Image: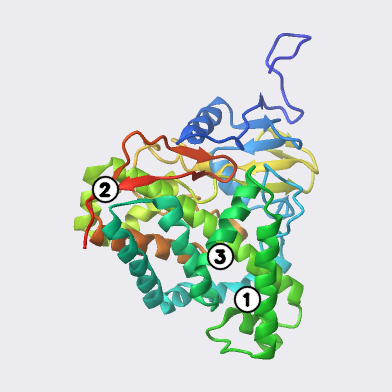
Amino acid sequence: MTDPSTGNPAVAPAGCPITHTDYRVEGPILEHYAQLNAEREQSDFLLNDSTKDPFYMIQRFDHVLEAMQMPEVFSNDIVNALDPFMEVRFLPNNLNPPEHTRMRKVLNRWFSPAAVRRIEEQVYQRCNQLLEELAPKGECDLVSEFAIRFPTDMFLVTIGLPVEDGGKFTEWVEALFAGFFGGPDPTPAANAITAYFTDAIADRKANPRDPEWDFISRMLRPDLVGDWLTEDDLLVICMTLMTAGLDTTRSALGYIFQHLARDEQLRHRLTAHPELVPKAVEEFVRLYPLVVQDGRLVMRDIDFHGLKLKKGDVLWLGIGSANRDPRKFPNPDEFDLDRPSLSHHLGFAAGPHRCLGMHLARHELVIALQEWHKRIPDYAIAAGAELRERGGQLALVNLPLRWAPTA
């Protein structure tokens, strides 16, 4: 954009260049990451005016990390820069300290490493059941036949709901996220999910389960979680855990498997040495973070490294940009299993709002990769397939894979 009066590049009120890139638009695979790389190198900060509510993009690793650690200035009243004033509320995402701290203490127990290990046997079992269905077929759309089914079933296991409900949940989730990103109206799917959780809460009130194993039963126990958590809060928490956990893991699996399908040497290395998979997952999450941006609301006027922000401004904290910042990661667009400090990425964010489900997500990804490659070590992307990625929250639209069928 240029200033018509001077012919010079236009400058935003905060003193940075302006961009019109609309990150909500579907495009060829990795196109959004190429755009993010280019804009990060153009300027430390940009004002993006592609949406009804323009937002300032913080793009470089050190700046994004610092901003995530300033909740008193950059508030979680907004969590998505692309749709900052959405009607949907998320818990604990939309909370700020001290309310956020109090709720995270209650929820952290359910998503701790120990809690994840407790359901490990069920995770392995469900993963292998899915693979037993897929391996003999010799082909699948990984996105719809594995990448969404596996985390959906694991979500139900995690909170103590019947894994048999995974089929209808998958349909609802697909409809819900399609609607979020420009597809048909998601209201019917949202209403069905709300009704499901409403019935589950009513059932646990009438027939409490073991609070050590059943999430909803525990959340209904004021002696265990406090008397401040309302039933409405619990309903929002269940919806949040579902929306935050399923689409993000589906996204990660899609990008990881397309990468491995193209990199035979890396795939064979991980197949031969499955103990390397946890390290690989860290590098994959750096390259293809589960969430490409976090939104924030500026609470007071502040000069942030020369960016003169005003109270009420909307921020984009660029996780996807920061994780590929060459100032932090040499050769950032390359997968490097031997990269020093593999876990020093922002794929699970940072600060008080660091991802609640990061231990579960890591565990699911590790198990999915290890178990898949035991059964299907060699596969390829279907000939002639055009891979595209959804805008907004990045995810592959589909990923057709082919392999030699196995018994």
In the picture of the structure, the residue carrying the numbered disc 1 is 106
Q: Earlier in the sequence, mark 3 or mark 2?
A: 3
- Residue 219 is drawn in which quadrant? bottom right
Q: Earlier in the sequence, mark 2 or mark 1?
A: 1
Decide: few, some or many residues near mark 2? Use Cα within 10 Å; few <14, some 14-19, many ≥20: some
Q: Is residue 142 above or below residue 302?
A: below
Residue 193 point in image, percent of width and height: 65, 66
In the picture of the structure, the residue carrying the numbered disc 3 is 169
Q: Secondary structure at mark 1?
A: helix
Mark 1 vs mark 3, CA separation in Å: 25 Å
Q: Are marks 2 and 1 in contact (CB under 8 Å)?
A: no
Mark 2 vs mark 1, CA separation in Å: 42 Å
Q: Amino acid at mark 2?
A: Tyr
Decide: few, some or many residues near mark 3? Use Cα within 10 Å; few <14, some 14-19, many ≥20: many
Residue extending farthest to the left is 272
Q: Is residue 236 left or right of residue 312?
A: left
- Residue 215 is drawn in which quadrant? bottom right
Q: Earlier in the sequence, mark 1 or mark 3?
A: 1
Q: Residue at x 70, y 15 (%)?
A: 2
Q: Residue at x 59, y 57 (%)?
A: 351
Q: Residue at x 60, y 54 (%)?
A: 175
